Image (cartoon, rainbow, N blue to C red):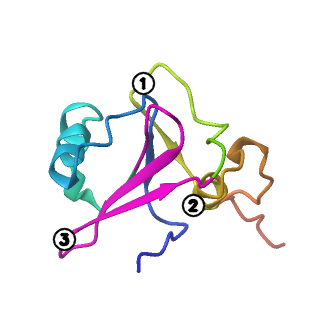
Amino acid sequence: MIQIAPQMRILVAVQPIDFRKGIDGIAQLCRAGLMVNPFSGAMFVFLNRGRTALRILVYDGQGFWLCHKRMSTGKFKWWPTGDGAATSMQAHELQVLICGGDPSATRAAPSWRRLEEAE
């Protein structure tokens, strides 16, 4: 079982991909399309063209995990947009996205903030 930890680097591909690709094909997309080494330990999230399923690729130090979630009804309504090939996401936002929600509507404390000095 993989755990989505707050300190993980999570990259979400903006454009949908062909889900006929397996681990090797998606790892190549990470290298060529996202310009990130798939062995880096980052979590890579992809959407299919029909917006009904997503895949997560992550390397855990021993091998690759390829997780697949298909919605039983409906589609993923929210997906990031932008000029780049990928965008980063926080762990709590990915958990909302996996459940089919809108991560941009989540309200959470910032992951890091400067502490005020005590007097």
User: Measuring 19% from the left and 33% from the top, which residue is drawn there?
Assistant: 32
36 on left or right of 70? left
User: Measuring 72% from the left and 44% from the top, which residue is drawn there?
Assistant: 102
Q: Amino acid at mark 2?
A: Ala
Mark 3 vs 2, N-terminal side: 3
The answer to which quarter of the image holds residue 57 is bottom left
In this view, the residue farthest toward the bottom is: 1
94 on left or right of 10? right
Residue sitting nearer the eye, 19 or 105: 19
70 on left or right of 97? left
Callout 3 environment at 10 Å: few (<14), some (14 to 19), or many (20+)? few
* Residue 83 x/y as whole percent: 47, 19
* Circles 3 and 2 in contact, beta carbons < 8 Å: no
The answer to which quarter of the image holds residue 8 is bottom left
Residue sitting nearer the eye, 27 or 55: 55
Q: Secondary structure at mark 3?
A: loop
Residue sitting nearer the eye, 39 or 54: 54
Residue under numbered circle 2: 91
Mark 1 vs 2, N-terminal side: 1
User: Measuring 15% from the left and 51% from the top, which residue is drawn there?
Assistant: 24
Determine which of the numbered discs, if any, sits on residue 84 in the image.
Answer: 1
Mark 3 vs 1, N-terminal side: 3
Q: Main secondary structure of the magenta part?
A: strand
Determine which of the numbered discs, if any, sits on residue 63 in the image.
Answer: 3
Which span is picked out in magenta?
45-72
* Residue 104 x/y as whole percent: 72, 42
**Measured Cα–Cα span from mark 3 to mark 2:** 21 Å
Determine which of the numbered discs, if any, sits on residue 75 in the image.
Answer: none
